[in-house]
Amino acid sequence: PPCLFNKVPQVHKSTSRANLMKCFSGYSAAARMSPAMQMKVFENWYNKDLAQDAANVWNNFYIGSLLIGLLVVLLFGGGRCCGNQQAAAHGPFGATGGSTGMSSFGYNRGY
């Protein structure tokens, strides 16, 4: 899939490998190379000539993974990460209020 080519490193590398092997099939010199030698040529080409492209794909992958992770957290864990919303709306003592027991010590006299 073309949309994954520049976002998923494994797709980028395998597609790049397939493209180079396709190019190899059109040249007689490449046909004389063993498959192991062709793989060495590919690895050298990918790690040197395509290093910047590969780094960009990894950056896209990290950013995309972070965004998807944040979306999952917001969709499935959004209410839980901020505490119980019902308790926050009613205060620490529930909807009817309550007493801490401190009024008998003079802490809640209102002055």
Image (cartoon, grey):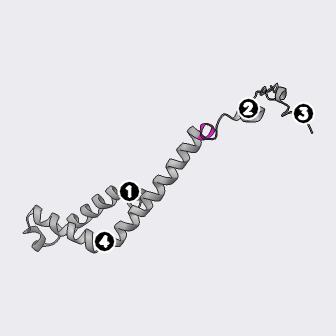
> Magenta span covers which residues?
78-82
Question: Comparing marks 2 and 4, which lies closer to the viewer?
Answer: 2
Q: Which mark is residue 50?
A: 4
Question: Comparing marks 4 and 3, which lies closer to the viewer?
Answer: 3
* Residue at image coords 55%, 47%: 71
Q: N-terminal of the two: label 1 or label 3?
A: 1
Q: Which residue is mark 2?
A: 92
In this rendering, is residue 15 above or below 88?
below
Question: Seen in the image, is 80 located left or right of residue 105?
Answer: left
| Magenta highlight on residue 23 | no
Q: Amino acid at mark 2?
A: Pro
* Residue at image coords 71%, 31%: 87
Residue 25: x and y, percent? 16, 66
Residue 99: x and y, percent? 80, 26
Tell me if label 2 and label 3 are in contact, CB under 8 Å.
no
Real-space CA distance between mark 4 and mark 3, rounded to the nearest whole angstrom: 75 Å
Real-space CA distance between mark 2 and mark 4, rounded to the nearest whole angstrom: 59 Å
Label 4 neighbour load within 10 Å: few <14, some 14-19, many 20+: some
Q: N-terminal of the two: label 2 or label 3?
A: 2
The tally of labels here is 4
* Residue at image coords 53%, 43%: 72
Question: Comparing marks 1 and 3, which lies closer to the viewer?
Answer: 3
By secondary structure, the bulk of the magenta-drawn segment is best described as helix
Q: N-terminal of the two: label 2 or label 1?
A: 1
Q: Helix or strand or loop: what does disc 1 sit on?
A: loop
* Residue at image coords 49%, 53%: 66
Question: Seen in the image, is 109 located left or right of residue 8?
Answer: right
Which of the 4 image quarters holds residue 37?
Answer: bottom left
Q: Which residue is mark 1?
A: 8
Q: Quadrant of the N terminus?
A: bottom left
Q: Which residue is mark 3?
A: 109
In this rendering, is residue 104 above or below 42?
above
